[in-house]
Structure formats: C-alpha cells, structure tokens
C-alpha cells in the first residue's frame, strides 16, 4: 500500500497517453466506416492503385492503433504499481512514430505532388528522429532531441498549409465564369482548406504543447491522433466526390431563368407558301399549300474535370444549349 500511495499524479503523463489512445480509437473507427463506404461506392470506378492506397493507409493505421494500445496496456496493467517503469520508454511507442510518418507521407503525396519536396522533408525528418530515438530507453532522453521533435511538427504544419494552398490554386485556376459552377468550385475550395486545416492545427498544437510542457505527455495526446486525421482526410476526399457531383447537378437544374432571354423568340417560325395554279385540262383552280417547320434541339454535354495532381477526377457533367442540331420537315 505504501508503494501505491507514493505514485505521483499521472494526469498529464499516463493520463494524457490514455486519452490519446481512446480518441485515436474513435477516429480509427470513423476511418473504418469511411473505408467501407468507399469500397462499396467506388470499388468499380477508381484505379487499382487508389484502392490499394486506401487499404495500405488503413492497415498501417490499424497497426499504429495496436502499438499505442499495447503501450498503454503495458504502463497501466503489466507494470501497474511499478513507479520506476513510468520513466521507461516503450519501444512500441517509438515504432508508432515511424508508422505515423509513413501514413502522413502517403496521404500528403496523394493529395498533391507539386510540393513533394516539403512532403519528402517531413518523411526524412521523422526518419532521422526515429533513428536517433529508437535506442532511447527513458522518456527523459527525448529531451535531447526536442528540437528535432519540434521540427517534425513545423514541417507537418507547413506541408498541410502548402497542400491546401496548392489545391486552392488549382481550383481557382479551373474557374469557368459560369455563376453556378463557381458556387461548386467555392465549395471545393472550402473543403480543401478545412481538410488541411484540421491536420495543420493538430501539428501546431503538438508544437505548442511540446514547447510549453516538454516534460509531460500532453503533446503525445495530440500526436497520437495525427495519423487518424490523415486517414480520415484521405477517405473524406475520396468519398466526397459523389456528393460534389450531386450538388453540381442540382445547381444546374435550379438555374434562375428570371433574367434569361427565352430562346423561343429566336426560333424560326413556320414558313407557309400558298400557290395557285390552274389545271391544264379542266382549267380548275388548284391550291397547293407548302409548310416548312424547323425543329431546333440543343444537345451538348460539357464535362468538367476538377482534379489536382494525383487526385481522381470529380467528373462533373452539365448540359448547356450551345450546339444546334436542326431537323427540317416539309409538309405538302
């Protein structure tokens, strides 16, 4: 009992680790649901490499969740009451860092390749961190590479901001000038910003916690959720394509025609020609009526592919009356 009573407060250390594991488990479950939706919706459409990417990211995230759950189990169950072991750095926690880097690298590379140098820097920085810290046996030793830890968070935040900026640039460049397609592009821009905002803010919070509370696990609480947020970001990007196409179609169908000029006033009117002739034998007057009707149909499908580097097409289709296909009928 005396040893148990001497256990220090664990709220900002093991308690933070426990909360991080639980929140990460919830996000992993949400990502699993998104993966199921993706495969049931896009399994026949997307290329095989995209489907393999989704599975690999999910698998690595599952391994990541297993590693941090095992780490938490060791501290809270296996070594329960062993105060000295609270300072020991579990190897599973360090291996988790490697899987986090791989997941972030895969998702960031998928989202854009225009800023691959920043994304590559994130992976290299984490690999250097992993190589230095894998031999550590105590948490206190992590303070020796605290600057490298902070560099990882900085590079992550910069990469997310650059990805969001690149996507916004590509979307703005694809503007068509049509009012209703502009609204859809604005939604896509907002989605791109919000997707990178969450992961970027998480990296910034990790950095702040590491700077303000370097001897606690508060930064680990947020770092554990990083890979989950990236997995959900990837799946949300893929699964949102159907919704985008639906919204685009609805916006086209709801065009306000109050200020439009009716095309009927430009439609050619039937031309009637009445000709009177006299029969050559009887001299009886015969009238022949010739009526020419012109039917004009509009049939032109404009396909708009809103795509970023490495991203599948949104394949937004809309119909505009631009080409004329005329059919002439002569009635006698």
Image (tube, rainbow, N blue to C red):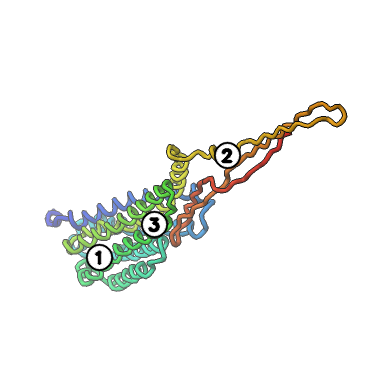
- Residue 184 image offset from top left, x and y in percent: 41, 48
Q: Secondary structure at mark 3?
A: helix
In primary-sequence order, the first of circles 2 and 1 is 1
Q: Which tag is nearer the camera, tag 3 or tag 1? A: 3
In primary-sequence order, the first of circles 3 and 1 is 1
CA distance separating discs 3 and 2: 37 Å
Task: Using residue 119 as the reference point, say whether residue 255 is left or right of it.
Answer: right
Which image quarter: residue 293?
top right
Examine the rendered structure and indicate whether residue 111 appears above or below residue 327: below
Residue hosting label 3: 172
Residue hosting label 2: 267
| Other residues around mark 3 within 10 Å, as few (<14) / some (14–19) / many (≥20) | some
- Residue 157 image offset from top left, x and y in percent: 29, 62
Number of numbered callouts drawn: 3
Task: Identify which residue is drawn at 19% across, 57% down.
Answer: 81
| Other residues around mark 1 within 10 Å, as few (<14) / some (14–19) / many (≥20) | many
Examine the rendered structure and indicate whether residue 151 appears above or below residue 268: below
Q: Secondary structure at mark 2?
A: loop
CA distance separating discs 2 and 1: 81 Å
Residue hosting label 1: 89
Examine the rendered structure and indicate whether residue 40 appears above or below residue 256: below
Q: Secondary structure at mark 1?
A: loop
CA distance separating discs 3 and 1: 47 Å
């Amino acid at each position: 009992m005396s040893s148990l009573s001497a256990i220090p407060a664990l709220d900002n250390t093991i308690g933070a680790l426990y909360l991080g594991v639980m929140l990460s488990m919830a996000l992993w479950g949400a990502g699993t649901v998104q993966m199921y939706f993706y495969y049931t919706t896009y399994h026949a459409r997307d290329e095989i490499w995209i489907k393999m990417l989704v599975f690999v990211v999910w698998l690595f995230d599952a391994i990541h969740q297993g590693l941090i759950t095992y780490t938490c189990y060791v501290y809270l169950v296996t070594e329960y009451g062993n105060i000295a072991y609270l300072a020991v750095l579990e190897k599973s926690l360090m291996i988790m860092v490697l899987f986090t880097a791989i997941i972030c690298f895969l998702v960031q590379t998928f989202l854009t390749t225009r800023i691959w140098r920043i994304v590559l820097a994130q992976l290299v920085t984490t690999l250097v961190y992993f190589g230095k810290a894998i031999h550590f046996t105590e948490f206190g030793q992590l303070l020796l590479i605290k600057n490298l830890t902070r560099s990882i968070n900085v590079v992550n935040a910069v990469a997310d901001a650059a990805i969001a900026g690149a996507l916004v640039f590509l979307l703005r460049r694809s503007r068509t000038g049509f009012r209703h397609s502009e609204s859809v592009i604005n939604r896509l821009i907002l989605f791109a910003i919000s997707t990178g905002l969450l992961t970027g803010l998480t990296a910034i919070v990790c950095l702040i916690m590491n700077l303000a509370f370097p001897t606690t696990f508060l930064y680990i609480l947020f770092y554990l959720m990083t890979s989950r947020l990236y997995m959900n970001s990837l799946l949300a990007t893929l699964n949102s394509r159907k919704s985008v196409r639906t919204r685009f179609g609805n916006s086209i169908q709801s065009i306000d025609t109050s200020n439009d000029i009716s095309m009927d006033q430009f439609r050619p009117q039937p031309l009637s020609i009445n000709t009177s002739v006299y029969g050559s034998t009887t001299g009886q007057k015969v009238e022949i009526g010739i009526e020419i009707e012109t039917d004009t149909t509009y049939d032109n499908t404009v396909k708009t592919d809103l795509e970023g580097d490495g991203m599948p097409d949104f394949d937004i289709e809309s119909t505009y009356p631009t080409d004329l296909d005329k059919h002439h009928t002569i009635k006698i």
